[in-house]
Amino acid sequence: MSDATTRAAELLKEHRESIDRLDAVMIYTLAERFAQTQAVGKLKAEHDLPPSDPDREAKQIARLEKLASDSGLDPEFAKKFLNFVISEVIRHHEQFQK
């Protein structure tokens, strides 16, 4: 193997290790987020509030699209991801309503 290939392999390994750490951060962050939304869902169920809040959801999507744009992340991807997360949260909230 040439020195350049060896160096490329080392860099690839470093990038992959960083990606692995970031994946762990995302999973733990999502777990914490869902713990908070579970608490919100229980509170909504206890007080007979609707499981979704379209106005808040729209504001959150707009806020996160801006954050994505500011950080160099594709805002459309951020919107799709947040819509997926919101749909899961609403599904959980609906389960508390039963």
Image (spheres, rainbow, N blue to C red):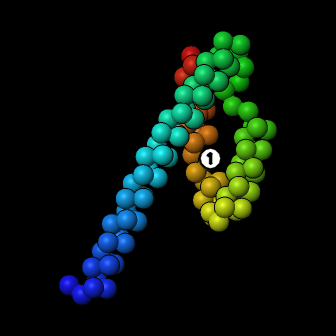
Drawn side of residue 83 relative to residue 24, left or right: right
- Above or below, comparing residue 88 to residue 25 in the picture: above
Measuring 50% from the left and 35% from the top, which residue is drawn there?
31
- Point out residue 15 in the picture as x, y percentages from the top left corner: 40, 65
Q: Amino acid at mark 1?
A: Asn
- Above or below, comparing residue 79 to residue 51 in the picture: below
Residue topped by disc 1:
83
* Foreground of the two, 68 or 55: 68
- Point out residue 85 in the picture as x, y percentages from the top left corner: 57, 42
Image quadrant occupied by the C terminus: top right
- Point out residue 2 in the picture as x, y percentages from the top left corner: 24, 87
Q: Residue furthest left?
A: 1
* Foreground of the two, 29 or 7: 7
Q: Quadrant of residue 4?
A: bottom left
Q: Residue furthest front?
A: 3
| Other-residue count near label 1 (Cα within 10 Å), few / some / many at <14 / 14–19 / ≥20 | some
Q: Quadrant of residue 76?
A: bottom right
- Point out residue 20 in the picture as x, y percentages from the top left corner: 39, 54
* Foreground of the two, 3 or 68: 3
Measuring 48% from the left and 46% from the top, which residue is drawn there?
25
Image quadrant occupied by the N terminus: bottom left
Measuring 52% from the left and 40% from the top, which residue is drawn there?
30
Q: Residue furthest top?
A: 46
Q: Look at the numbered disc 1 and give the secondary structure of its residue.
A: helix
- The reply to whether residue 94 is in sight is no
Measuring 75% from the left and 49% from the top, which residue is drawn there?
63
- Above or below, comparing residue 54 to residue 64 in the picture: above
Q: Quadrant of residue 33?
A: top right
- The reply to whether residue 11 is in sight is yes
- Above or below, comparing residue 1 to residue 78 in the picture: below
